[in-house]
Amino acid sequence: GAVVSQHPSWVICKSGTSVKIECRSLDFQATTMFWYRQFPKQSLMLMATSNEGSKATYEQGVEKDKFLINHASLTLSTLTVTSAHPEDSSFYICSASTSGRMNEQFFGPGTRLTVL
Amino acid sequence: AQRVTQPEKLLSVFKGAPVELKCNYSYSGSPELFWYVQYSRQRLQLLLRHISRESIKGFTADLNKGETSFHLKKPFAQEEDSAMYYCALSGGATNKLIFGTGTLLAVQP
C-alpha cells in the first residue's frame, strides 16, 4: 500500500514551453503533497507543500509563478514548469502524506525534465 | 536554522564490517528524525524513524539530543545494503522534511 506514481517519468521539451508533471496517490488519500527538486549527485530540495483545495506554500527562493502547483483532489497534484529554460532541467520528485500515517511521506519515482 | 548534516559523501566498507552513517541536525524545537534509503534506480523509501525505535534490515539509529545526532548503524554490512542514505528532519505543523546531502554506502564483497 501507499503507492505514489508520477507521470511522465521523463520529458524533453524546448526552451520556452511549459511542462506539466502529475503526482498521484494510488491507494490512499493524500492530504498533503510535497514537490522536491534534485540536482545530480545532490540532495532533495523542497520546493513547495500543497494541501488539497488550498494554495501551495512555496519555500524561500522558489518562484511560484514559474512552478505552478495545483492540488485539486486528494489523489492528484500537478506541477507545471512554465516557460521552461535549460536551468530548469532537473529531477522532480513528489511525495504524499496522509493524516492517518503521521508524518510519513511516500515518494514517487521522480520525473526527469530536460529542457533544450 | 534548521539543518541536517551528513559529513560523508561516500562510505565504503567490506561485507561483514560494521557500518555507521553519521547525521547531525540543527533544530530549535523537538524534531522527528528519519533515515530514508534509495537503492539504485528505485524511489526513495523510509528506512526508519526515531519514534518507532525499531530495527529495519538490521539498521538502528538512536536520537542523541545532547549531541544532536541520529547516526545510522548496522553491525554487519551486506552487499545489498549498498545504496544512497539520506537523513531527514521534520518539525512543526507542516510535516515537511529537510534532507541531508546523503551518504553513498558501498559494500564491497
Image: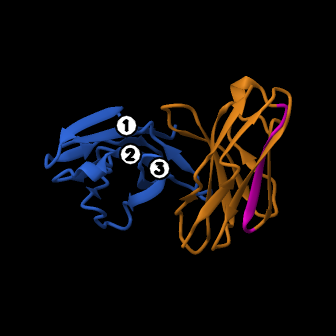
Chain colours: A orange, B blue
Crowding around mark 2 (Cα neighbors within 10 Å: few <14, some 14 to 19, many 20+) is many
User: Does the magenta run of residues contain A78?
Assistant: yes
Residue A16, image x, y percentages: 86, 28
The disc label shown at residue B85, or none: 2
Of badges 1 and 2, nearer the viewer stands 2
Q: Can residue A13 be seen here?
A: yes
A95 or B80: nearer the viewer: B80
> Is any part of residue B8 visible from this angle?
no
Q: Are marks 1 and 3 in contact (CB under 8 Å)?
A: no
Q: Give the chain of mark 3.
A: B
- Local crowd size for mark 3, using a 10 Å CA cut-off: few (<14), some (14–19), many (≥20): many
Q: Earlier in the sequence, mark 1 or mark 2?
A: 1
Instruction: Tell me the tag on residue B6.
Output: 1
Left or right: residue A31 versus residue B72 is right
Amino acid at pointer 2: Tyr
Instruction: Check disc 1: other Cα within 10 Å, few if <14, some if 14-19, many if 20+.
Output: many
Q: Residue at x 27, y 58 (%)?
A: B60
- Relative to B35, is A17 on the left or the right? right
Secondary structure found at label 1: loop
Q: Residue at x 81, y 59 (%)?
A: A54
Q: Point out the frontmost of discs 2 and 3.
A: 2
Magenta highlight range: A74-83
* Distance CA(mark 1)–CA(mark 3): 12 Å
Q: Write down the residue under mark 3.
A: B89
Question: What is the three-letter code of the residue carrying label 3?
Answer: Leu
Subunit that carries the residue with mark 1: B
Name the subunit of mark 2. B
Q: Are marks 1 and 2 in contact (CB under 8 Å)?
A: yes
